[in-house]
Image: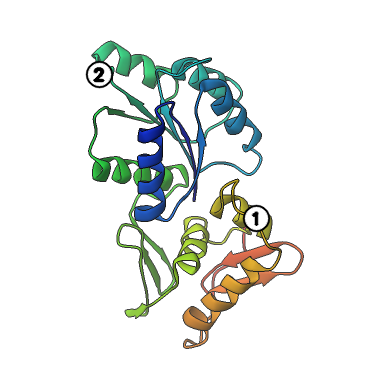
Amino acid sequence: MRVLVVEDEPRLAANIARGLRENAGYAVDLAGDGEQGLYLATAQESSGYDLIVLDLMLPKLGGLELLRRHRAQGHRTPVLVLSARDEKESVVELLNAGADDYVAKPFDLGEFLARAKALIRRGKGQGSPVLREGSLEVYTVERRVRRCGREIQLAPMEYRVLEYLAHRPRAVISKSELLEHLYDFNWEKFSNVIEVYISGLRRKLDDPFPDKLIHTLRGQGYVLRAGDDPAPEV
């Protein structure tokens, strides 16, 4: 998953990014003002951020105005707002402008991460923290994987690839989409890295079992689908 954090306080932005990377395994991009935040949110919409974390008190362009412009352009990325302003009127204004959730500063990092994960799940139509496809179970809170009741040990990047696929079961996911959602701007993307992780997932998730879950559509991408399910959605 890929998150945009728009926060002008460097230390807080760094702490949020570290929490998202270390505790949730998300890729994180940072913007230090509202204009940069709006540009990144709009520029990446073709591939899409999975969540925007937005401070209200920003230089150049305020968070509320950024939110309004972003929603006016038709973007539906979940937005979690951070602010020291906790008046009831401000919360109502934020929700009416299109915010999905609100956390008042100072906040507990554990609560923040739980809210962030919940928004990402809801944004992908998944209400439960446990993602299931056939005999596969992905526990997104603990970052654990089971198949047919058996615990499967995955490397961190293998898990991230699988979790993204599991959020969109039976949909065709291209290699470029996986790269955009798994890495931030600072990582130099290599052409075959996704194939390496898919190969590892097949070896651990599919080879020990008769029914295969990970399917390749040549020239299109990958699909997580239980073997007897209908054709994948594009």
Q: How is the image coloured?
A: rainbow
Q: Position of residue 116 (x, y in %)?
A: 36, 42
Query: Foreground residue, 21 or 200?
Result: 21
Residue kind at label 1, given as amino acid type: Glu
Q: Which residue is mark 1?
A: 188
Q: Position of residue 83 (x, y in %)?
A: 32, 23
* In this rendering, position of residue 67 left or right of residue 176: left
Say which residue appears at 61% left-offset and 23% top-offset.
Answer: 73
Toward which corner of the image does residue 118 lie, by quadrant? top left
Q: Which residue is mark 2?
A: 86
Relative height, residue 130 to residue 226 (above, below): above
Element carrying mark 2: loop
Relative height, residue 19 to residue 95 (above, below): below
Say which residue appears at 56% left-offset and 48% top-offset.
Answer: 184
Relative height, residue 110 to residue 192 (above, below): above
Query: Foreground residue, 192 or 96?
Result: 192
State whether residue 189 appears in this view: yes
Mark 2 crowd level (few <14, some 14–19, many ≥20, 10 Å Cα): few
Determine the CA span between mark 1 and mark 2. 40 Å
Q: Position of residue 177 (x, y in %)?
A: 63, 53
Mark 1 crowd level (few <14, some 14–19, many ≥20, 10 Å Cα): few
Q: Counting residues from the N terminus, which is met first, the one under dot 1 or under dot 2? A: 2
Residue kind at label 2, given as amino acid type: Asp
Toward which corner of the image does residue 97 lie, by quadrant? top left
Query: Foreground residue, 4 or 100?
Result: 4
Say which residue appears at 40% left-offset and 40% top-offset.
Answer: 14
Of the 4 image quadrants, the one containing the C terminus is bottom right
Q: Position of residue 32 (x, y in %)?
A: 49, 28
Query: Foreground residue, 178 or 36?
Result: 36
